[in-house]
Image: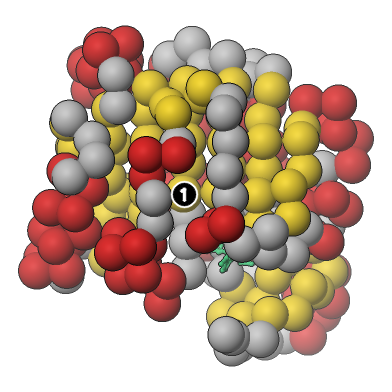
Amino acid sequence: MKRAEIVSFRDVIKSGRFSKYTPSLLIAKELGLKYLIVEENNITGPAVGTTILVDKITKILKIENMLDLCCGTGALTKIAIENGVKKIFVLDKNLKAVKENLKPLQKFIEFIEGDIFRFKTTEFFDLVVLDPPRYLIEKIVERFDFSTINTNLFVMWHGSFSEEGWNSYVRDKLRNFFDKVYSFSVYGEELSVCSGTHTGKKMLERLMKKW
Ligand SMILES: C[S@@+](CC[C@H](N)C(=O)[O-])C[C@H]1O[C@@H](n2cnc3c(N)ncnc32)[C@H](O)[C@@H]1O
């Protein structure tokens, strides 16, 4: 397991380790996030592609509730709340950053600290977003029990658009669980948007039309 540090936005900028124009820092600044997560000298999120996709989905579609898996700083949850989503479950093995960042929005959020592989819920979601660390993706697509996640739409980040073989491997695995798996390349990042239900398929069609 890699070592992650929770660092304040101010200290990250002061340290000079990262340019202030680093995309994750620009997004964090726009969202007013006070804490970031630094792992092995990299800021782990929020990434540009996932941020834009979640912003578009929660603006274009009517999303009543959402599950933010591997929520990290809580950036995606903050965007969803700004776009009108009223109930969000957030899960991460470390909730320190998200709890600090989203303190004023607590009434919209259910915090769950734990391992994604042990997570079970009976809740039905309009949208589930999974933004995992790259090193965990193979284990997720091979071993995660997607049947425990009931959702209209499922969104997952899986890397760079240039890794064609890898991206089709991830998508083929997702096709074992979801009827429709669409690929989205957003600013060089590759994401899959999957529909798990008839309503999810309609939502996906609307998203493609309005994108
Ligand atoms: C790419 S970051 C997520 C970035 C996030 N979307 C954001 O905007 O900050 C991946 C997150 O996965 C979490 N994570 C890693 N392994 C996990 C596991 N087994 N269970 C739950 N969370 C995990 C890390 O703590 C980290 O916050």
User: Which is nearer the eye, 109 or 44?
Assistant: 109
Image: 100 above or below 134: above
- Front-most of 186 and 141? 141
Q: Nearer the viewer, residue 165 or 161?
A: 165
- Quick check: 98 left or right of 75? right
Residue at figure coordinates x 31%, y 11% from the top left: 199
Residue for point 67% across, 36% down:
89
Answer with the quarter of the image where residue 154 lies: top left
Residue 198 drawn at (x, y percent): 25, 12
Residue 49: give x, y in percent of width and height. 39, 50
Please provide percent x and percent y for residue 99. 84, 50
- In-image side of 124 versus 32 (left or right): left
Q: Nearer the viewer, residue 116 or 203?
A: 116
Inspect this view and state whether residue 82 appears. no
**Residue at the image position 69 percent from the left and 70 percent from the top:** 37
Residue denoted by label 1: 130
